[in-house]
Image: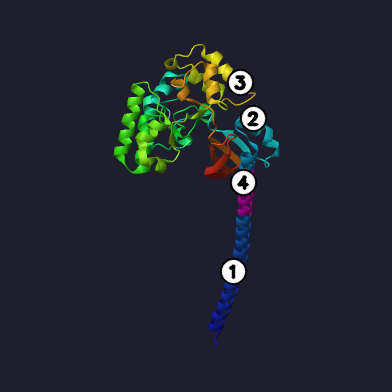
Amino acid sequence: MTRRAQGFATLAAVAIFVLVIALISGAVLGSQQLALDQDRLGHEIDSRASAWKSIDTTLSSMQTSWNADDQSFDAWFTEKAQSLPAGVKLASLSGRINLNSITPFLLQYSALSGTLVGHSVTEFTDYRMNKGPFARLEDYKDYFRPESLKRLYCVYSSFDVNTADEIILEKIITQRTGKSSLGANVRARVREFRTGLQVMTDSDWDRIIGAEKDELGDIVSVSPELDVNTASVDVLQALLRDADFKLEQPDAKVQTIINGRTAKPWTDDALRQALGLTKTSALMQHLGTRCRFVEGSVPAGDRVMSFVVHLTYSKDASPRIIARIVETSSEARP
């Protein structure tokens, strides 16, 4: 073999040796990365499983230890917080005003108008109409002051046919049933009741919606959206001070609500009597006494799992609570 041929053979051998080393090194590094990825995935799975276990324990405790007739949700959580899984946080959403259902009139002519920033009420309602009836809270971040958005408002409640925006009601009915004519009819009937200053009852609603009620479920009802037993002073003042309701001494009535709920939750009848209102009062269509939506969060490793729970109540003498998760999300810890 010539020297040139020997040189080429030597170079080839060196190249093959280097390639083999590189492949081995790559395989080792790839194996190490794969192991890290598997460890990370395993950790995430374990963290999520632990978070779900904490949520399940929390909901079980809520359903077995909370009597909503004896304690408000806030009172129950304060009492049970230390015995719940570590890191669990809960808050009532029913004490806040649903931006997906609020009428432009309530927003325009109450103290709530001061929570808007950079946009008018008309711009807000136009945006909501285009966005749809089930927008998320963050969708409204450009329309409301950040502190007010998180403290006073929510996007979860059933929609009360006596108080919810009629255009939104029409969109919900149409979307859920696929029948635009039914949505338009519901809107027209809602307008008739409101123009005549009449309160729509369960029997009225059954007659109007007919067989489609089962398809809608409890997303649309005649039950007030707000829970006065968990509502903040600011929310209660915004409603009771609204001149349209013509309530005498509204601030004193707000204090009556706050003081009264410390011992025991308000019932509908007791609240009406304390405020001096009738069943057909327009204000009483806004003021409910049940917490129906709760938001919560729980640590999940280096993330936080958030969830929203829908609460329903049986018709027993001491109502049983059924808790159902309707949404979950996860984000990195701050």
- Do the residues bearing badges 2 and 4 touch, measured as CB atoms within 8 Å? no
- Mark before the other along the chain sequence, 4 or 1: 1
Q: Residue shown at 65%/38% (left/top)?
A: 65
Residue 226 can be seen in this image: yes
Task: Give coordinates of residue 127: x percent, y percent.
Answer: 38, 32
Please, what is the three-letter code of the amino acid marked with disc 1?
Ala
For disc 1, the marked residue is: 22
Mark 4 vs mark 1: give the one in front: 4
Badge 2, how many Cα within 10 Å: few under 14, some, many 20+? many
Give x and y (percent) for residue 230. Answer: 57, 28
Main secondary-structure element of the magenta-colored stretch = helix
User: What quarter of the picture does the N terminus occupy?
Assistant: bottom right
Label 3, label 4: how far apart the Cα atoms are: 32 Å
91 up-or-down from 325: above or below: above
Q: Are marks 1 and 3 in contact (CB under 8 Å)?
A: no
Distance, label 2 to label 4, CA atoms, is: 20 Å
Question: SS for tag 4?
Answer: helix
Region in magenta: 43-57
- Identify the element where label 1 is drawn: helix
Q: On the image, which quarter does residue 180 sit in?
A: top left
**Kind of residue sitting beneath label 2:** Ala
Q: Are marks 3 and 4 in contact (CB under 8 Å)?
A: no
Q: Which residue is mark 2?
A: 75
What type is the residue that disc 3 sits on? Gly
**Secondary structure type for disc 3:** helix
Q: CA distance from mark 2 to mark 1?
A: 65 Å
Q: CA distance from mark 4 to mark 1?
A: 50 Å
Residue located beneath label 4 in the image? 56
Say whether disc 2 or disc 1 marks the residue closer to the N-terminus. Answer: 1
Which numbered disc flags the more N-terminal residue, 2 or 4?
4
Q: Nearer the viewer, mark 2 or mark 3?
A: 3
The residue wearing badge 3 is: 260
